[in-house]
Image (spheres, rainbow, N blue to C red):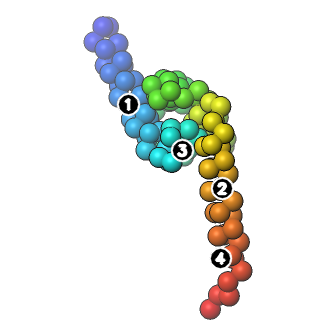
Amino acid sequence: MAVRDELARRRYEKLIDRLESMMQDSLKPQYMGYYGQLILSGDDLAELGDLKDVRHAAREAGRRLGWKTATRLVGDRLFVLDEREVPKEIERLAGDEAAAAIDRARQESQRPRG
């Protein structure tokens, strides 16, 4: 029985490590670790394992990254979010970037297509 528990523990640790890496990769450097989010599709979830284990592992991976981690299941997607309070300067930077992206999208939609 101990061998099975050890294998399960190793699998779980690997899951945490994998999710932590995915979460780290999703961060934008300019936000200095804030505004973290990872969206796992239904296919991702099927590959990673049991939903309960994935959620638990994601919260542990978030703790390792210093996140205040929340998970939300919407349809077949799992959202892993950092819900920490964001410093004002980073919030302002993110707002400016979002506004610029909206402006670019609006300008592109008004271009004649040919």
- Comparing labels 4 and 1, the label whose residue is closer to the camera: 4
Residue occupying image coordinates x 45% and y 25%: 64
- Which residue is outermost to the bottom? 114
Which quadrant holds the C terminus? bottom right
Residue of label 3: 31
Q: Which quadrant of the structure image shows residue 9?
A: top left
Q: Earlier in the sequence, mark 4 or mark 1?
A: 1
Residue 60 location in percent, x, y?
A: 48, 23
Foreground mark, 4 or 3? 3
- Name the amino acid, label 4: Glu
* Callout in the foreground (4, 2): 2
Callout 2 crowding tier (Cα within 10 Å): few <14, some 14–19, many ≥20 = few
Task: Evaluate if marks 3 and 2 touch, with contact meaning CB atoms under 8 Å apart.
Answer: no
Q: Which residue is mark 4?
A: 108
Q: Which residue is mark 2?
A: 96
Query: Element at badge 1?
Result: helix
The three-letter code of the residue at mark 1 reads Asp
- Residue drawn at (47%, 46%), measured in percent from left and top? 29
Q: CA distance from mark 4 to mark 1?
A: 40 Å
Query: Helix or strand or loop: what does disc 4 sit on?
Result: helix
Which residue is depicted at the point 28% across and 12% down?
A: 3
State which tag comes first along the sequence, 3 or 2.
Answer: 3
Q: Vertically, is 108 above or below 73?
A: below
Label 1 to label 3, Cα distance in Å? 22 Å
CB under 8 Å between discs 2 and 1: no
The label shown at residue 17 is 1
